Image (cartoon, rainbow, N blue to C red):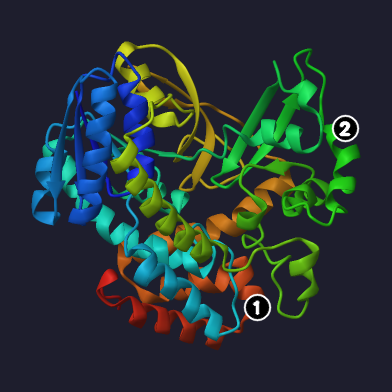
Amino acid sequence: MKITFMGAGSTVFARNVIGDCMCSEALRDSTFALYDIDGQRLEESRVILEAMRQTKGGYGKIECYLGVENRKAALRGANFVVNAIQVGLYDPCTIIDFEVPKKYGLRQTIGDTLGIGGIMRGLRTIHVLKDFAADMEEVCPDAWFLNYTNPMAILAGYMQRYTGVNTVGLCHSVQGCSQGLLEQLGMEDKIEGRRDLIAGINHMAWLLKIEDKNGVDLYPEIKARIQAKIDEPGFHNKVRLEYIKNFGYYVTESSEHNAEYNMFYIKSKYPELIEKYNIPLDEYPRRCIEQIAGWKREYEDILKNGVKDHERSHEYASWIMESMVTNTTYQIGGNVLNKNHLITNLPAEACVEVPCLVNSNGITPCYVGALPVQCAAMNMTNINVQLLTIEAAHTLKKEHIYQAALLDPHTGSELDIDTIKKMVDDLIDAHGDYLPKYN
């Protein structure tokens, strides 16, 4: 077995995913190939993971591959490829994604999935994934590409439509969705044995059904409790509860994410909404700064005191690999192409998030049917942007970047057409070689 981790300089995430593999008898004797273009970050990951490997019995081995010239070697013969790259990192590209739009009066919270930040992040990442795909088709054509990088629907959708690589998009927002909602509303007694159904698109998949262990629908009680939480000044999940009020269903990803996926909450003409809904503008840059500083402290502590024992997490990656290797069935929430009309009122070319069954045959998406019409309509406002961003990356036509930005719910509700186009031009210029040339 060979498990290749692309972007292994993302040490915390590499530690979690590969650490999970080391906890599995079926996976622990694998070769773990670490790939990155940053030598220092790669070495930090190697040190941590080698120490973890020793604490887990010394099974398997770790190999490191630095730089584009060694990428094909990192991928050669891989059974699974985990992708966690961040093209352009926080500095300069995340800074560009936030600071350029801010000059035009456009504010964001996360900027990694939708909005103008999500569009630019998608374009510069597809630029790199094209090369990953070409290498994989040559040196590991049967491998599964497990994508964790955002914008999920854009990247996974591109790989599934325009490459021959077996691809699934993975996000951990599905696993904790229903439990987190019940905990926030003081309904912890309903968690054990609950049953739920989640489907839609990444970061806006809908909790379509939630029942207790006896099959009782929990939504009536949930809806009776949400207003008290919305009225609570310090509560930070108000946007998602507002979704329940106005659209009938809860969504998978956080309120700081969903605040910028629509035209409702971040509005320059209604600045009071920011405080009312506790919307953390510039949240992602703030997190990046904190995480960089936090990792430096943690790494120094690990060098001084050693690694702590790793317990297997709920991240899907290792469970998928184990399921395929041992031919045991496992269920995930996966991001897959809607080509078989898994969700009948969303486009076939959209990347949707639906229940999927995993075994030695691979990943089999499950049929969901039609979403409630209002949920499908909300998803379509995001899918429009995703499809046009993919089209821009595929055709290298700048007009499709303009169109993606124009149809983005938040961007289009704040800025006029000419301003949006000028902002896009400035973003392209600022990104320089992180983007290909568009005509």
Residue 417 location (% of width, % of height): 57, 83
Q: Residues within 10 Å of mark 1 (few under 14, many from 20)?
A: some
Q: Which mark is residue 285?
A: none
Residue visible at 23% across and 24% down in the picture? 54
Residue 147 appears in the rendering = no
Q: Is residue 356 left or right of residue 359?
A: right
Query: Exactly how many numbered labels are in the figure?
Result: 2
Q: Which residue is mark 1?
A: 414
Residue visible at 20% across and 23% down in the picture? 30
In the picture, the quarter occupied by the N terminus is top left
Secondary structure found at label 2: helix
Q: Which residue is mark 2?
A: 220
Q: Is residue 427 above or below residue 123?
A: below
Instruction: Give the residue type at disc 2.
Output: Pro
- The answer to which of 151 and 86 lies nearer the viewer is 86
Q: Marks 1 and 2, how far apart in space?
A: 35 Å
Residue visible at 33% across and 16% down in the picture? 360
Instruction: Give the residue type at disc 1.
Output: Glu
Q: Is residue 27 left or right of residue 64?
A: right
